[in-house]
Image (cartoon, rainbow, N blue to C red):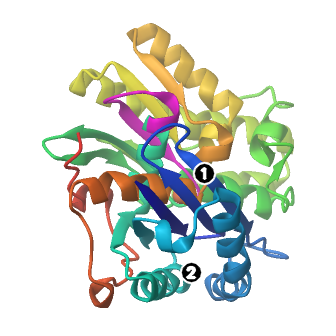
Amino acid sequence: MKVLGIESTAHTFGVAVVQDQEPYILSDERAEYVPEKGGIHPREASLYFMKVAPKVIHKSLKASGVNASNVDGIAVALGPGLGPCLRVGATIARALAVYLGKPLIPVNHAVAHIEVGRLITGVKDPLIIYLSGGNTMIAAYSGGRYRVLGETLDIALGNFMDVFVREVGLAPPYVVGGVHQLDRCAEEGKVLLKLPYVVKGQDVSFSGLLTASLRLYRQGRYSLEDICYSVREVAYSAVVEVAERALAHTGKTEMLLIGGVAASKYLREKFEALSRQRGVRLAVVPPKYSVDNGVMIAWTGILMFKHGVTIKPEHAYVKQRWRLDQVDIPWL
Ligand code: FE2
C-alpha cells in the first residue's frame, strides 16, 4: 500500500510517498517558508505554499518512482495549525483525491508526529513529550486515544524560546547549525537568576516567564548569557517535572521525545537523566523527522486507511484547534 501525504500546518509544505513495508519512505520533499523578519505570518506562508506546491508534489512523485494513479490514498493534515496554511494543503488534497479518484485520509498533525516517531525509533507505547513551536504536551495512549496528561496553559515552549531570543536581539535566525539561539547563549551563562517557575498541577505556563525574563533583560543589570541560562533552566525543568510525574502515574516504560524542540541537546540530557533515574527507555526522533514533514502525514495515513478511516472531500474541513485527544486510534 502506498499513500501520498501532504503537510501544510505551519511553515513547511511537505509532500511524501510512503508505503506499508520496508523501506517505508519512498520520497520526502519539503519547502520551508522563512519570514524575512519577525514570526510566521500565516497569510504570507500560505501564499508561499501556493507558489511552491506544484513543484513539491511533482518532485515528490518523481523521486518516489510511483505514478500518481498508483497511490492508494491521499492523506492530508487537516489540523491543528494555521488556518490559511492548512487550507492550501486541504484544497490540494481534496482536488487530487477527486481528480485521481482516490480515498482522502484526514490526518491530525499531532498524531502524525507521534506515529512517525514510533516508526523511526521503534518504541511501542511510550509516554509522549511533544515540544515544538506550537505545542507543549505530555501525552500517553490509553483506552483508544492519546490522552493529554499535561500541557501549556498559554504559549508553547518553542514559541516562548523564539519570542524571547527575538526580543533580546539574538534572532532571526532562530537556529544556527541545528542549535537554538537560546541554547547557544545559555551555554555561556553561569548565574541562576530568580525567575517565575510555573507548574500548575500537570500543566505548565510560559507567559509569566517571558514577561519576567524580558523585564530582567531590559533592566540591564545582568548579562544576557546569565538570563538565557536561567530562562532555559526554568523552562526545561518545568517540562521535565510534569513528564516525570506522568511517568510515575502511567507506569510507561518508554519515553518518546518529539517536536522541533527535541533537537535541543541540553533538553535531551535532562530527559536522559530522567530516563536513567526511572529505568525507562528514552527515544528521541532525529531532527529530520521531528520537524514537520510529509512523511509523518503519509505514514499516519497508511495506519488510518488500514483501519478504514477516510473522509469525503466535501467534508474535509480544516480544524485549526483539532486536539490530539479527539482522535480515535484504532491501531494500538
Ligand atoms: Fe509540527
Give the camera-side residue of 211 and 270.
Answer: 270
Range of magenta residues: 119-133
Would residue 283 be counted in the magenta stretch?
no
Compared to residue 322, the image places residue 93 above or below, namely below
Name the image quarter holding residue 318: bottom left
Name the image quarter holding residue 242: top left
Image location of residue 35, percent across then percent down = 78, 75
The quadrant where ligand 1 appears is bottom right
Q: Amino acid at mark 1?
A: Leu
* Label pair 1/2, CB-CB below 8 angstroms: no
> Is residue 60 in view from this perspective?
yes
Q: Residue at x 48, y 83 (%)?
A: 96
Tell me the quarter of the image containing the C terminus: top left
> For residue 85, which numbered disc appears in the image?
2
Q: Is residue 97 left or right of residue 164?
A: left
Q: Residue at x 65, y 69 (%)?
A: 11
